[in-house]
Amino acid sequence: MSKYIAGPFDGARAERFAIDAEIIFALCRAGFSDESFGDDVCTLFGRWLFNDPCPELGIVFKPTSRLQLFVDAENPTDRECGNPHRFWVHEYNVDGELLSYNCFHSLEDALKWKGRISDDT
């Protein structure tokens, strides 16, 4: 299976953070794009969340928050921060303030997360 090298990583770092194509396809279908930068801890994907507009009530279409989804190394021993979870999701408001975050073992669970930390996540 081919791997995707996200962001500007190179050499051994690129090999550690290479991502299966299935993960990339799932992230693209969910509206995420690669936003990795050279000094990131691991590969980063982001997307905006928007409200439901209702012209009858004067509610216009606008961003409500931003999600950042980090994809750490597949091999747990290669992970930068020693976190046992491979996927981290951070939610920020439109001003860039962190609202919530959570970590997941599977991409499927990370993409289903609705934000806000709770006991049932």
Image (spheres, helix red, strand yellow):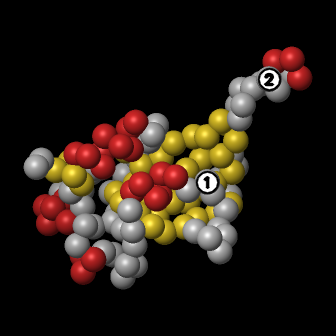
In this view, the residue farthest toward the left is 1
Tag 1: residue type?
Lys
Examine the image and state in which quarter residue 101 appears. bottom right
- The image position of residue 116, as x and y in percent, is 67, 62
Q: Residues within 10 Å of mark 1 (few under 14, many from 20)?
A: few
Q: Secondary structure at mark 1?
A: loop
The residue lying at 25 percent from left, 67 percent from top is 74
| Residue 17, above or below 53 | below
Q: Which amino acid type is shown beneath numbered disc 2?
A: Cys
Q: Which residue is mark 2?
A: 54
Seen at 40% across and 36% down, the residue is 29
* For residue 15, above or below residue 53: below
Q: Do the CB atoms of the residues marked 1 and 2 lie less than 8 Å apart?
A: no
Q: Which residue is outermost to the front?
A: 120
Disc 1 to disc 2, how far (Cα)?
22 Å
Q: Using the image as rendered, state which of residue 40 and residue 76 is in the foreground.
A: 76
Q: Quadrant of residue 97?
A: bottom right
Where does the image place residue 108, in percent across and percent down from the top left?
42, 54
Task: Give the residue number, with chain letter if any, for mark 1.
Answer: 114
Q: First in sequence: mark 1 or mark 2? A: 2
Q: Residue furthest top?
A: 56
Identified at 46% across, 37% down, the residue is 31
Residue 57 against residue 105 in the figure, above or below: above
Q: 80 or 26: which is nearer to us?
A: 26
Residue 59 visible within the image = yes
Residue 27, percent from left and from top? 38, 44
Q: Is residue 41 visible?
A: no
Residue for point 80% across, 23% down: 54
